[in-house]
Image (spheres, rainbow, N blue to C red):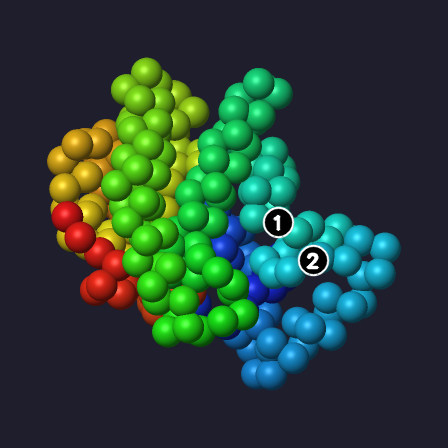
Amino acid sequence: MVYDLWYWTGIPGRGEFVRLALEAAGLPYRDRAREPNGEEAMLRDMRAHPLCPPFAPPYLVAGELVIAQTANILLYLGEKHGLAPDDVAGRLWVNQLQLTIADVVTEAHDSHHPVAAGLYYDEQQQEARRRADDFRNSRMPKFLGYFDAVLAARGDWLAGGVRWSYADLSLFHLVDGLLYAFPKRMETLVRQYPRVTELHARVAGLPELQDYFKSDRRLPYGDGIFRHYRELDSA
């Protein structure tokens, strides 16, 4: 099966969590919105599934299945392609981690758009400064400390064992995005949470991902979830 991944073009965003899983597992897929007139085609395709319409991208078309929500897509891929533990408890644990990562992603986005997603950053910059201050000093340490404690208990990978799960790939992308958006703050935090930093390096070195990292399939950060504004960053 060749999967169809639909997500906004030009930004890594939430679609990147799915891309990393597809790429690391060597699964064939088409990044449909990056094709000519792809975003227009995506908006048409979203209306083509009236019984189970996706609320928003990313969503994955797998044969007759239309699967939306990042964690839901990864739950499906994890069970079908061995990207999560075989037992129910293990699969639920990895899904729990993914949902926790999704919480951080939302807070990272809201650090620069705390009032409304439909407003420009410049229209809510004062509120963003206050929100980013709390995110940097309270929320980032809390989340990173949680993942560091999990790795302390389980070893190299979040699910334990000797092989990565999709949650490890997602934590890599989260940390990578925070390094881009908050480089000063992360310079301090990476020393405090060394196990998370080491996991980021392990995933960056996975042989399965080297071709992807060197290709134009991997999109640069910019105007998506993880944005760098100097005035929002501080050690």
Q: Which mark is residue 36?
A: none
- 77 displayed left or right of 62: left
State if disc 2 and disc 1 touch (CB < 8 Å): yes
Q: Which mark is residue 69?
A: 1
- N-term-proximal mark, 1 vs 2: 2
User: Residue at coordinates 19% horizontally, 48% vertically from top-left?
Assistant: 185
The residues tagged by marks 1 and 2 sit, at their Cα atoms, a distance apart of 8 Å
Q: Position of residue 231 (x, y in %)?
A: 22, 63
What residue occupies the far bottom of the structure in this picture?
37
* Amino acid of disc 1: Gln
User: Residue at coordinates 69% horizontally, 58% vertically from top-left?
Assistant: 55
Front-lying residue, 154 or 222: 222
Q: Is residue 77 visible?
A: no
* Amino acid of disc 2: Phe
Q: Position of residue 57 (x, y in %)?
A: 61, 61
Residue 116 versus residue 148 in the image, above or below: below
Q: Is residue 184 visible?
A: yes
The residue under label 2 is: 55
Answer with the quarter of the image where residue 5 lies.
bottom right
* Label 1 Cα neighbours within 10 Å, binned few <14 / some 14-19 / many ≥20: some
Q: Classify mark 1: helix, strand or loop.
A: loop
Rendered-image quadrant of the N terminus: bottom right
